Image (spheres, helix red, strand yellow):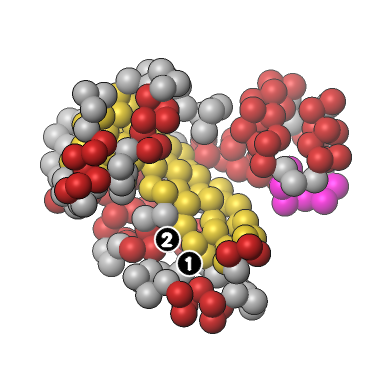
């Protein structure tokens, strides 16, 4: 996020709750910050002169000419019945060079937490797999979702962090960075020096293998 977003960017947070995320980035200098929150009390709490909050469904809001550089959805997608329509509206509402991030619970194949996740979260309509998320987003973005699955044994669950650019060329560039997670032995010479500098900002903190992170940093 730090690498992709710029402080001049416009941000829309879908399911903004009490404005925690938007206020966090407001403190870092971001200016155009909008949220969508159906809970009136949460929406009221988050209005502080900095944030603009819509109290309506994403599908029902007419943004007019407004487009966003970044649209986020933190633990929201699993609650939405009209998931296809929401992903399409996300695409339509992004600037040409815009991107979207999301976090959602997920169920990898043969998940050890299957019964636990379904038994404790009855409000969740969906539990996506990595494959289903990629199919869903490719249908509307026409490019491949960049996704990382994270195991949360303390909570007996998994989550998926997803990221995708509206622009296919930009997305393919960042998809190359994902190889540093997926490949056991990646040839760092495949990346330009600038790409590795950009990459370090985004991914180094997310790499669990500290030796691998050190190797990338030194390179």
Image quarter where the C terminus lies is top right
Whichever of labels 1 and 2 marks the residue nearer the N terminus, that label is 1
Q: Mark 2 points at which residue?
A: 136
Tell me which residue sits at (54%, 77%) in the image.
116
In reply to whether residue 191 is colored magenta, the answer given is: no
Tell me which residue sits at (60%, 52%) in the image.
148
In reply to whether residue 182 is colored magenta, the answer given is: yes
Q: Mark 1 points at which residue?
A: 128
Q: Which quarter of the figure has residue 47?
A: top left
Q: In this view, does 71 lie to the left or right of 101?
A: left
Q: Is residue 131 left or right of residue 6?
A: right
- The one nearer the camera, 168 or 82, is 82
Tell me which residue sits at (37%, 55%) in the image.
76
Q: Picture coordinates of residue 109 (x, y %)?
A: 61, 74
- The one nearer the camera, 204 or 164, is 204
| Residue interval drawn in magenta | 180-185
């Amino acid at each position: 996020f730090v690498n992709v977003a710029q402080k001049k960017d416009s941000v829309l947070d879908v399911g903004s709750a009490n404005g925690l995320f938007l206020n966090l980035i407001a403190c870092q200098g971001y200016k155009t910050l909008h949220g969508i929150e159906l809970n009136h009390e949460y929406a009221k709490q988050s209005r502080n002169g900095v944030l603009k909050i819509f109290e309506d469904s994403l599908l029902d809001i007419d943004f007019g000419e407004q487009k966003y550089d970044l649209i986020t959805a933190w633990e929201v997608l699993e609650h939405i019945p009209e998931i296809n329509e929401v992903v399409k509206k996300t695409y339509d509402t992004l600037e040409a060079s815009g991107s979207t991030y999301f976090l959602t619970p997920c169920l990898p194949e043969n998940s050890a937490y299957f019964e636990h996740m379904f038994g404790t979260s009855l409000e969740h309509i969906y539990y996506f797999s990595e494959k289903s998320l990629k199919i869903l987003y490719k249908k509307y973005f026409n490019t491949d979702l960049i996704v990382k699955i994270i195991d949360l044994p303390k909570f007996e669950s998994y989550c998926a962090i997803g990221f995708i650019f509206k622009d296919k060329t930009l997305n393919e560039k960042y998809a190359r960075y994902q190889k540093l997670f997926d490949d056991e032995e990646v040839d760092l010479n495949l990346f330009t020096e600038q790409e590795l500098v950009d990459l370090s900002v985004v991914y180094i903190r997310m790499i669990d293998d500290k030796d691998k992170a050190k190797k990338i940093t030194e390179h």
